[in-house]
Amino acid sequence: MWVSLWLGNAYVSCVLDYFFPWEQQTVTRLIAGLIGMVVYTLSAVYGLIFLFGTVLGFHLGDSIEETYYSTIVITLIITLFMTGRMFFANWRQAAVDAERMKKESVEAQYNNLKNQVNPHFLFNSLNALTNLVYQDQEKAVKFIKQLSDVYRYVLDSRDKEVVSLEEEVKFIGSYAFLQQIRFGDKLKIEVDLVDVKSLVAPLALQMLVENAIKHNEISEEHPLVIKIFKHDNHLVVENTLQRKSVLVDETSGLGLENIKKRYEFLSTQAVKVLEAEGKFIVSIPMIELT
């Protein structure tokens, strides 16, 4: 009796694992396991009683039959315990795996974004530097220093999930200097974050500024104004909306989408994107200093 129940239930469990994997169909596997093992246990016990008592003609006696019935109860209790244990073990493992995969996915996107200082930015900066060397050598020296600071920050923040807002604002200052050498008075970047304390994803603000520059017209007739400030518990990057008539490239919108994914990992609040009254506004949640 015990051998048939032990081996039989183990076989039933293996069959159910094949058709209803714990990792993919956890609840279905739990229900199927309970039903399958109850049905098998009752069928096996009554089948053995019928085989030995009726077919083979053995006189089992009342005490033996009572033992069989107690066996059913004990087996069902053990089965319920083992199935429940497997359910919670696999449910917990599935939750851990899902969280790990989510974290790895976001970190992959995060690393991809950190490593993507646009090659066009470097190309344009070097072109601007070439012209500047002949026009104003003192400003060219300052330009080289600021360019060095930009790439030093990129390298230093490569392995960080967050940096202080103060570091990011200083980086934005260097980045803005390089862009304003290129565009002059046609580009205005205003940062109003004095005494604001927060953490921020590295390069997040820079990416939003770069998106504004990349996707909007910048000319004497239509200067681009970008403002960075705090509103409620968000850091806001706002720019005048004057889209270029031709799509910039196939990666349009990917930088913003990556920022959204990064903040899903870093904060319980979502990144907000809004177009209103001729302005494009992106708000990223502030991360408390803890």
Image (cartoon, helix red, strand yellow):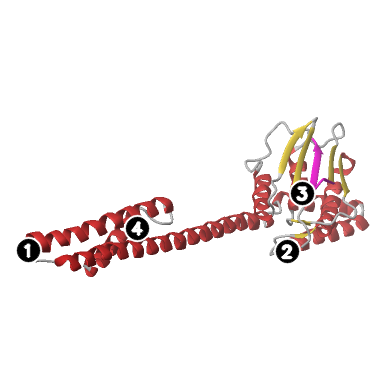
Residue 200 coordinates in the image, percent (x, y): 76, 55
Residue type at the position of mark 4: Asp
Identify the residue position indicated by label 3 in the image.
Answer: 124
* Cα distance in 3D space between marks 3 and 4: 59 Å
**Is residue 241 found inside the magenta-colored segment of the image?**
no
Write down the region rendered in magenta: 230-240
* Cα distance in 3D space between marks 2 and 3: 20 Å
Between 130 and 170, the one lying in front of the other is 170
Position of 17 with respect to 45 (left or right) is right
Mark 1 closeness class: few <14, some 14–19, many ≥20 residues within 10 Å: few
Instruction: Name the secondary structure under disc 4.
Output: helix
Identify the residue position indicated by label 2 in the image.
Answer: 155
Residue type at the position of mark 1: Leu
Q: Which of the two discs, 2 and 4, sits closer to the camera? A: 4
Magenta region's main secondary structure?
strand
Residue type at the position of mark 2: Leu
Identify the residue position indicated by label 1 in the image.
Answer: 56
